[in-house]
């Protein structure tokens, strides 16, 4: 790991100001993704600003009857919160399906959202990778791509967003609260938070320099069945090949798919037609623009089957 | 000339000697063996009930602080990337991977390592059960397995659900299936899993 300057943020404002002023600075929360990447010199920040002392670790009820989850709430605490277990079980399930208990005990809400891809070439610093080193090329295209994206990818990058929690947040219509060095705040739908790679795969989300995530908000709960199904190469402690987060109510169904794209994949338009059209058509619409490789086209079939069984087992 | 018998020297005493100096405002044994030159900062850790004031390179992980600076080598470094669980320690009551956290992030925190689990009167019940059930072969993963399993049983007691908990709104049970899932962050290269499970299930009184 390269040397860096470590400091603790005294306040949110202080953290944002230092993040904006210090060249090549990064926040550190749980550290479970950032330190992993720093040890491999995939991330080489010159300064780390520790946000763990900031009062962003609460889960509160909002005026609208939803929940506001602080950026520093640990994954364990979010999954175990009685209100989340009761009203947003898809979120508890998604978190519990990810990583290990040791990691979830450290990992935070914001850090989890910002976790980086698990593309094997992103991790191998001897190989070209546009995300790690813009302009160097993409080793995954024409390489080993079994775990990579089937949709939403570009000619410069076919990596997936690997996380589970965000897939549930997407199906729950969550929003992200962001604060900057001037104390300005903004609210962004999770749907618009992660970016598709286009020709700049190194830019993975909508955060500007100096911006900090302060919370994630869940809207008022809806009467529904909620399911998270994760298909992976072993029963525990592995990233998803395909995952499906579902919220199924009396007269609606919402699905977000993980493991297939550079962000949690969802189509509200296709969902509206699902009850009339059936799941096969729904899945076709969802993956209409897919560009799979020979190695990963199985993901589309897998996703359709998981959608099918989730739908038939849980519809009205 | 009379020669004095030398005291037996093993790896442990050599390390302990080297790190004794490090414990009280250290020489900063560069943990990764990299050339130093990085800045140092101080941090106070409470490890197994004892306070350690350390002066560390900023990039020192909690794992390296424990092993290289305090001399507690019971905690092992397997992968150094959060994948194997060999470095599991209990911080403020929760198990974490000490390889993926910086020592400086733990000012004032209470850390329990394998060395701190045993009480004054001998082994912790989990240690005794591991011995009884032959729950290891090479032993490299063992301290992580034991720290992890002790904290894991507390998590079930605290009502923290897992991936295999059937009813999210009920208290999780201490079933072998729950134990298996909850221990998946601890890899055993020797494959001693079935005996590890027997040991944990005995202590948990699993049904
Ligand atoms: C072995 C292993 C297996 C895993 N398996 C899974 C899995 O199956 N499923 C899954 O979903 N995840 C998995 N993970 C990933 C894990 O969930 C993430 O590492 C974790 O959620 C990151 O959270 P953190 O708080 O530790 O982030 P950090 O490492 O502290 O930070 C990550 C990024 O977020 C930034 N950041 C942190 N807080 C803020 C903030 N408030 N505002 C702006 N930026 C911020 C940091 O600067 C950094 O760039 C696994 C990880 C490991 C090591
Ligand atoms: S898919 Fe993206 S992350 Fe993977 S090698 Fe190509 S550019 Fe890098
Ligand atoms: S050494 Fe920390 S998890 Fe392997
Ligand atoms: S006993 Fe050898 S790794 Fe577990």
Image (tube, grey):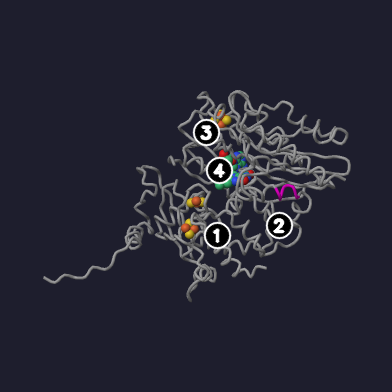
- Against B206, residue A44 (above or below) is above
Left or right: A92, with A47 as reference point: right
Q: Return the mark for residue A121.
A: 3
- Side of B95 where A275 appears, left or right: right
Rendered residue at 64%/47% (across/down): A98
Give the magenta range: A89-93
- Tell me if the residue at label 4 has its CB under 8 Å from ligand 1: yes
Report the residue marked by disc 1.
B193
User: As rendered, which of A48 and B176 lies closer to the eye?
Assistant: B176
Residue A29 visible in the current orientation:
no
Do the residues indicated by labels 2 and 4 lie within the same chain of the protein?
Answer: no
Report if the CB atoms under discs 1 and 3 are less than 8 Å apart: no
Residue A303 is drawn in which quadrant?
A: top right
- Nearer to us of marks 4 and 3 is 3
Instruction: Say which of A2 and A291 sits in front.
Output: A291
Horizontal side, residue A310 vs residue A105: left or right: right
Q: Are marks 3 and 2 in contact (CB under 8 Å)?
A: no
Q: Which of B68 and A143 is in front in this view?
A: A143
- Label 3: chain? A
Quadrant containing ligand 1 reads: top right
Distance from mark 3 CB to nearest ligand 2 atom below 8 Å: yes
Q: What element carries label 2?
A: loop
Residue A119 image-quadrant placement: top right
Q: Residues within 10 Å of mark 4 (few under 14, many from 20)?
A: many
- The Cα–Cα distance between marks 1 and 4, rounded to whole angstroms, is 27 Å
* Residue tagged 2: B165
Q: Mark 4 points at which residue?
A: A33
The CA distance from mark 1 to mark 3 is 32 Å
Tell me residue A57's x, y (percent): 65, 50
Location of the C terminus of chain A by quadrant is top right
């Amino acid at each position: 790991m390269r040397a860096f300057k470590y400091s603790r943020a005294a306040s949110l404002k202080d953290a944002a100001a230092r993040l904006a002023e210090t060249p090549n600075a990064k926040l550190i929360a749980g550290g479970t993704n950032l330190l992993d990447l720093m040890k491999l010199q995939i991330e080489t920040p010159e300064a780390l600003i520790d946000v763990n002392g900031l009062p962003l670790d609460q889960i509160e009820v909002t005026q609208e009857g939803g929940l506001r989850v602080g950026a520093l709430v640990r994954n364990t605490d979010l999954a175990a919160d009685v209100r989340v277990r009761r009203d947003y079980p898809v979120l508890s399930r998604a978190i519990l399906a990810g990583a290990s208990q040791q990691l979830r005990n450290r990992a935070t809400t914001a850090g989890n959202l910002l976790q980086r891809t698990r593309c094997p070439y992103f991790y191998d610093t001897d190989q070209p990778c546009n995300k790690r080193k813009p302009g160097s090329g993409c080793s995954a295209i024409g390489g080993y791509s079994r775990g990579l994206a089937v949709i939403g990818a570009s000619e410069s990058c076919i990596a997936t967003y690997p996380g589970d929690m965000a897939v549930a947040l997407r199906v729950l219509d969550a929003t992200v609260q962001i604060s900057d060095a001037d104390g300005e705040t903004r609210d962004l739908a999770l749907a618009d938070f992660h970016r598709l790679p286009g020709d700049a795969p190194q830019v993975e989300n909508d955060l500007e320099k100096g911006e900090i995530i302060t919370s994630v908000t869940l809207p008022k709960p809806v009467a529904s069945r909620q399911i998270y199904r994760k298909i992976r190469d072993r029963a525990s402690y592995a990233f998803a090949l395909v995952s499906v987060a579902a919220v199924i109510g009396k007269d609606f169904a919402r699905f977000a798919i993980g493991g297939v794209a550079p962000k949690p994949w969802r189509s509200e338009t296709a969902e509206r037609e699902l009850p009339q059209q059936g799941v096969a058509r729904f899945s076709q619409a969802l993956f209409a623009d897919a560009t799979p490789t020979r190695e990963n086209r199985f993901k589309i079939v897998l996703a359709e089957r998981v959608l099918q069984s989730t739908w038939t087992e849980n519809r009205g | 000339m009379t020669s004095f018998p030398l005291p037996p020297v093993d790896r442990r005493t050599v390390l302990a000697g080297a790190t004794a100096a490090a414990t009280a405002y250290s020489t900063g044994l560069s943990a990764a063996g990299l050339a130093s030159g990085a800045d140092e900062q101080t941090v106070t850790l409470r490890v197994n009930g004892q306070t350690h004031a350390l002066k560390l390179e900023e990039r020192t992980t909690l794992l390296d602080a424990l092993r290289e600076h305090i001399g507690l080598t019971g905690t092992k470094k397997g992968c150094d990337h959060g994948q194997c669980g060999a470095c599991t320690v209990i911080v403020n009551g929760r198990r974490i991977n000490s390889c993926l956290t910086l020592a400086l992030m733990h000012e004032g925190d209470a850390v329990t390592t394998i060395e701190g689990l045993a009480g004054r009167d001998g082994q912790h019940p989990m240690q005794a059960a591991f011995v009884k059930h032959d729950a290891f072969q090479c032993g490299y993963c063992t301290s992580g397995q034991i720290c992890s399993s002790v904290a894991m049983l507390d998590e079930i007691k605290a009502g923290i659900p897992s991936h295999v908990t059937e009813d999210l709104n009920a208290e999780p049970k201490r079933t072998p299936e729950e134990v298996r899932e909850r221990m998946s962050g601890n890899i055993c290269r020797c494959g001693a899993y079935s005996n590890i499970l027997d040991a944990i299930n005995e202590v948990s009184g699993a049904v």
